[in-house]
Amino acid sequence: DTKYKGRIAAPLADTRGVTLLPILTRLKGGDYKQDIEPGFTVLKAIAPNVATWDPAPDCYAVVQSGEVDLAICWNGRAQYLHDKQGGKIGIALPREGSIGQINTISLVKGSKQASAAQQFIDYALSAEAQRTFAEQSFYGPVNTQVTLSAPAAARIYGSKEAQQAQWALDWPWVAERYAPWIQKIRRDVIALH
């Protein structure tokens, strides 16, 4: 939409860009493991509409301040700010579905407090904690025993159509290509615009 020309913040030189490439490739009918170029083609087409590739202090603030109208941000944080700031920013979840970024929790080998740490990890991954975290922070739960309320699922994943279209990246496979993809985004998309 031409009304957004120069009104987009696209912080793509990080995990958002690496996540967006497979999504755009899929939207163009491709498979990110076979050829990521369809995603780059779409990024190059979007590039002239981007006002900033490095929104400061962050993608949420530049929308809130009115510097841009659209930004590529993480859903959980955007949902949280939407609620805490009285709806000052809105959230659009793609009807085509999306993918989740994986956060981890780990026990450090040789920890002096290993027992307490393991107890915390066990609780953090429990259905009770995961349900509460999902419904308060809008991160998808990792515990398969969690059933979300319909309103929480809609805020995390989008419409019923979008929920059915959710998919997962092969993160270990992507990790091997992360740095080259970021370099290519910087060189072939950001540097040219």
Image (cartoon, rainbow, N blue to C red):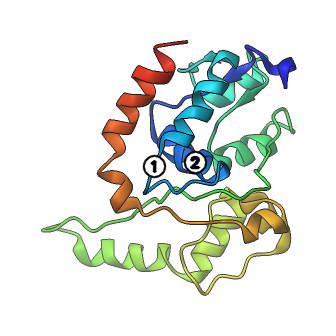
Q: On the picture, is 23 further left or further right than 114?
A: right
Element on which disc 1 rests: loop
Mark 2 or mark 1, earlier in chain: 2
- What's the amino acid at mark 1? Asp
- Where's residue 26, x and y in %? 61, 54
Give coordinates of residue 114: x percent, y percent.
23, 73
Tell me the crowding category of disc 2: few under 14, some 14 to 19, or many 20 or more residues within 10 angstroms, Cα based. many
Q: Position of residue 47 (x, y in %)?
A: 62, 21
Answer above or below: position of 105 versus 96: below
Q: CA distance from mark 2 to mark 1?
A: 8 Å
Labels 2 and 1 touching (C-beta < 8 A)? yes
Query: Quarter of the image holding residue 157?
Result: bottom right
Q: Is residue 32 above or below residue 65?
A: below
Tell me: 83 left or right of 57: right
Residue at position x 67%, y 30% from top?
Answer: 60
Mark 2, secondary structure of its residue? helix
- Please name the amino acid that badge 2 sits on: Thr
Q: Is residue 103 above or below residue 89?
A: below
Q: Mark 1 — residue?
A: 35
Residue at position x 80%, y 55% from top?
95
Of residues 77 and 39, the one nearer the viewer is: 39
Q: Which image quadrant for residue 2?
A: top right
165 above or below 39?
A: below
- Residue 64: % across, % down: 76, 24
Mark 1 Cα within 10 Å, few/some/many (few <14, many 20+)? Answer: few
The quarter of the image holding the C terminus is top right
Q: Nearer the viewer, residue 124 or 26?
A: 26
Left or right: 118, with 61 as reference point: left
Mark 2 lies on residue: 25
> Toward which corner of the image does residue 42 lie, by quadrant?
top right
